[in-house]
Image: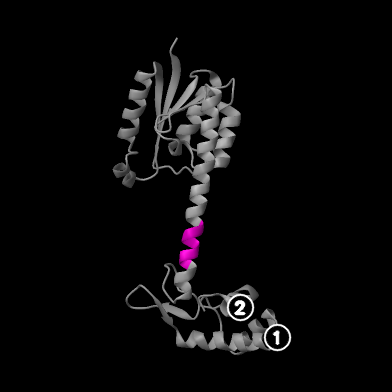
Amino acid sequence: MPTKCIAYLRVSTDQQADKGVSLDAQRAKAEAYAQLYDLTLVEVIVDAGVSAKTLDRPGLQKALAMLRSGEAQALLVAKLDRLTRSVVHLGELVDDYFSEGKSALLSVGEQIDTRSAAGRLVLNILASVSQWEREAIGERTATAMRHKASQGEYCGGRAPFGYRVAPDGERLESEPAEQIAIELAKKMRGEQRSLRDVAQVLELAGIRSRTGKVFAPVQIARMVEHVAY
């Protein structure tokens, strides 16, 4: 007897249409997979323009509710990251819905079928590797950004206190008036003055933050210790 299955499709932005994960592409893959493996698609559920950062998505919650009620025995996705990009969330879904004796999770891209022990093992391994890869990329990006900052290169966002974005938009240049405050703060810290003392002296000198407020101790610390300075 064919397994009743729900196809779940998701895109976070319209730009993803060029990356092989558009709604039409996902639907075609799901339908072809269902036909090949004798699955009965009882419904195709879509979350359009929704991030995978949370499981609280209307379409996904509807699909999970259908699994709980027994309207379907499996959830089919074109690729695992359409379901979630988080190992923590994936673990929750596996424990609650896709562990042995519960509903099945099927993925076209990774050829995952949790109806078998081997399928569940592959799912867990792929999820762990994917999480490691994202964290490694994040670490490399952070290191590169710190290096750019140490070279005086602009890394995007608002320029730190003491600097302004150069006309070319690609680097930082000194803001003379704010540099005076930085040098004064550095001098006092060199004299072992506390961060709070430094903030009070700057206030007495009429020097405030860009928002017009008194500097907080943590802002003084960034001012005198951060690599960008």
Q: Position of residue 119 (x, y in %)?
A: 51, 27
Task: Report if residue 143 lies within the magenta region.
Answer: yes
Q: Which mark is residue 192?
A: 1
Which secondary structure class fits the magenta region best? Answer: helix
Q: The residue under label 2 is which amino acid type?
A: Ile
Q: Secondary structure at mark 1?
A: loop
Mark 1 and mark 2: span between their CA atoms?
13 Å
At horizontal 45% and vertical 44% (from top left) the residue drawn is 51
- Using residue 76 as the reference point, say whether residue 90 is left or right of it: right
Classify 10 Å Cα crowding around label 1: few (below 14), some (14-19), many (20 and above).
few
Q: Which mark is residue 87?
A: none
Q: Position of residue 116 (x, y in %)?
A: 53, 22
Q: Compare residues 150 and 165 and report the one nearer the observer.
A: 150
Classify 10 Å Cα crowding around label 2: few (below 14), some (14-19), many (20 and above).
many
Task: Report if residue 102 lies within the magenta region.
Answer: no
Q: Which residue is mark 2?
A: 220
The answer to whether one can see residue 55 in this image is no
Quadrant in which residue 183 is drawn: bottom right
**Residue range of the region highlighted in magenta in the rendering:** 139-145
Tell me, yes or no, whether the two marked residues, 1 and 2, touch with CB atoms within 8 Å: no
